[in-house]
Image: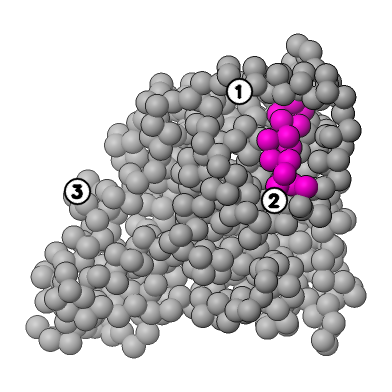
Amino acid sequence: MNSSRRLILILGDQLTPDLSAFDGADPGRDVVLMAEVAGEAGYVDHHKQKLALVFAAMRHFAAELRAAGWTVDYRTLPEGVPDFATAAAEAIARHRAAILVVTEPGEWRLQDEIEGWEERLALPVLIREDRRFLCTRADFAAWANGRRSLVMEHFYRFMRRRPGLLMDGDQPAGGRWNFDAENRKPARPSLFMPEPLAGADDPVTTEVLEMVAARFPGNFGALTPFRWQVTRAGAEAARDRFLTEALPHFGETQDAMLAGKPWMHHALLSPYLNLGLLDPLDLCRRAEAEYRAGRAPLNAVEGFIRQIIGWREYVRGVYWLKMPDYSAMNTLGATRPLPDFYWTGDTDMACLAEVIGQTLAHGYAHHIQRLMITGTYALLIGADPAQVHRWYLGVYVDAYEWVELPNTLGMSQFADGGLLATKPYAASAAYVDRMSDYCRGCRYDPKQRLGEAACPWNALYWDFIARHADRWAGNHRMAVIVKAWAAKPAEEQAALRAAAAAHLAALKAYGDAARPARPDHPSDDRSVP
């Protein structure tokens, strides 16, 4: 045996052939380890489709590596490997490896675990930087150093300049950095909205779907129809479909919501970016090329690129800068359990029923549905942010803690006290009515504040403002709303708070929010296509 043999550990979200862990490795000598481990599959209530997507993509990537000449030691979930440390220890013994190499994981808990492996495994463990991101952890820390606040817009301009994306010399294309104001129009149903590509249909994926159906029957969501790509070629085909068919219309209505239209003109590429099947800079350059060629408007392309090199890189930077303390933040002191309908979609509020039902069916909701429907409602009722975090981490196929936690605790729940957001994303029913058609089919009237037909969002909104009035009075973006609350007659204030209290008292929660005991959702079809 070669005493210098390396064991290269590839995690489930590192499905990239030029990953830094491969640097200097020899396919004729070294061994790649990949493992489906029970601990990762069960630490939150993962959506069935999320589990199927990750496992199927891992198995296809292993085949891709073998075709390129690598020896791959692949452990499947039925083998019962409890965690990565066990998988690594057993593989080291099997292959007599002299060193373990891994690209830094995306989640703090895994980084913390791997940093203790040298002593546990009794061999050198080399943790390499993840160059798939445009901004390293050290670069972000240097950018943040000395700043009183971490304003994403400032970071975004910094990131635009580095690779020269949408730049005309030293100026932004179109003379402006941000076209977000043009991207907030409501949408109308259309027969011409593009559909995503059909999901993977191959023996490997079928086997994984059968495994998930058998081993995770009580997990959140429906397993089929499975709409996701599980190979690099499939992800690239989805990318090309978006660029040609959806990107030109993505901009103006990217914040809009329509009942029965889960996809609209959104990219649905975040699962592939987060798995490592697509390269973020390459994707941004391809989008820019569509603008330069006159095939997509600037507001659409700028908004799309901002989500990738701006927001995606920004929340990763904040995550690594502030962890592990960030995950425990709860500035507003919110403690209420999430309502039971977050696991069933069974509620009379049409907006929540629509978004949660869509999430159950597909493991997907776009950013405004997450932020301004399920997120804002949780904020208004004072839901425990740690519980909200576990829900989001489990139910969406693109959710990994580095990207989900700051979005949830910071942007959505204001639990970090304003580190990410300058104001809470609180809203009344007027916002939902303006940006969606959900209210048309609802038993509640978004224009009424009080009475049996009144939308609960309205009383909950004002109750939220009242509960934290002292805090909001010192926020320059919220002070005018506090003044509006103070100007209401005492009788109206009391009535609104009583209505909110009645609504809150009627909410029901499952016992363990991380893994609730519940019947399967009626839309859960466990058959395999």
Look at the picture and state if 70 lies above or below 277.
Answer: below
SS of the residue at dot 3?
loop
**Residue 497 in the image, given as x and y percentages of width and height:** 72, 23
How far separated are the C-alphas under marks 2 and 1? 34 Å
Q: Is residue 417 visible?
A: yes
- Residue 392 placement, left or right of 304: left
Residue indicated by mark 1? 504
Q: Amino acid at mark 2?
A: His
Name which residue lies at 61% across and 23% down: 504
| Badge count | 3
Mark 1 crowd level (few <14, some 14–19, many ≥20, 10 Å Cα): some
Q: 473 or 329: which is nearer to us?
A: 473
Q: Can you give x and y, in whole percent of width and height, for residue 406 in the image?
A: 56, 56
Whether residues under marks 2 and 3 lie with C-beta atoms below 8 angstroms apart, the answer is no
Give the SS element for disc 2.
Answer: loop
Q: Label 3: which residue?
A: 80
Mark 2 vs 1, N-terminal side: 2
The residue positioned 38% from the left and 31% from the top of the image is 512
Bounds of the magenta span?
454-473
Q: Is residue 287 visible?
A: no
SS at mark 1 in the image: helix
Cα distance in 3D space between marks 2 and 3: 38 Å
Residue carrying label 2: 266
